[in-house]
Amino acid sequence: MNGFLRAASQVRATSGQAVDLVDLTVPVGVLSSAFFPYTRYDMFLALVDPGVRIDQAAPEIFTVSPSGGLVPESFHAVTEGALNQATVWSMDGSEVGPAQQVGSAEACVPSGAGMFRLVVPLSRSVNLVANGPPLYGVSVRYVEPVASSVTVLVTEPEGMIVDEAVPHQWEIGAGGDLFPLLAPAVRQLDGLAFDLVGGSCVTGLSLGEFVAAGQSG
């Protein structure tokens, strides 16, 4: 743990910025698995060091090495969300219609009270590797009328599966969310879905891979 605290302090001293982490499981060399289910970065590292941020779309992002050091990661998009083909569904499963365009935002849910599911197909389906690298991730840009917790689902030929990443906290106004894709047993990814409060918009969506410094994409 001291290794992580030293590394985070050094990054802040060098950059003057918060330390941004991609939310994963803390390595057992840093925190024993006996502490499960509290072994996620957001559940532990953010508590021992309040200066870290989790799953933010930031210029510099890190994962934690087995020794507690910080590993710089870069996100490489492999396909984009087809925002102009997004559809809106009510939470009872009935289709409302095409997503609304509000200004330059192509994929918005209706304004007003209530929740809606925004389904965004990918420009092309992606076949995911079952085990090992790469670590897949999703980058989302959004505009929110209020701060809210957003459930993310992945769509595959058999239906939708809730992603296992932590609840996504979207801030009011324009923002970004960059997170690892942790849905189990997904082999072909066709799109993503977001449960949103009325008036929310997705303004950008990419599926890609995280690549550690020194590795090729």
Image: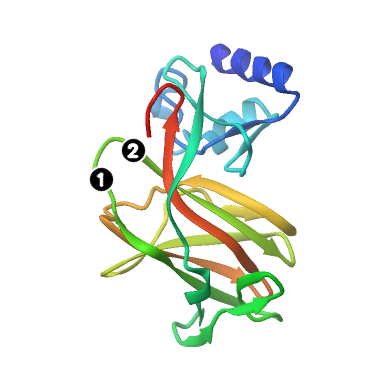
Q: Which residue is mark 1?
A: 129
Residue visible at 49% across and 40% down? 75
Q: Amino acid at mark 2?
A: Pro
Q: Which residue is mark 2?
A: 134
Query: Which mark is first along the chain, 1 or 2?
Result: 1
Q: Quadrant of residue 123?
A: bottom left
Q: Are marks 2 and 1 in contact (CB under 8 Å)?
A: yes
Residue 81, how many percent across, how many down? 47, 63
Note whether 22 is above or below 144 in the view shown: above
Q: Quadrant of residue 131?
A: top left
Residue 189 visible to an observer of this rendering: yes
In the image, is 88 to the left or to the right of 56? left
Front-lying residue, 198 or 190: 190
**Figure quadrant of the C terminus:** top left
Residue visible at 61% across and 77% down? 109
Front-lying residue, 212 or 199: 212
Badge 1 element = loop
Badge 2 element = loop
Looking at the rendered structure, the number of numbered marks drawn on it comes to 2
Q: Amino acid at mark 1?
A: Val
In the image, is 172 to the left or to the right of 21? right
Note whether 60 is above or below 183 in the view shown: above
Residue 199, how many percent across, how many down? 69, 74
Front-lying residue, 8 or 72: 72
Residue 125, how many percent across, how many down? 32, 61
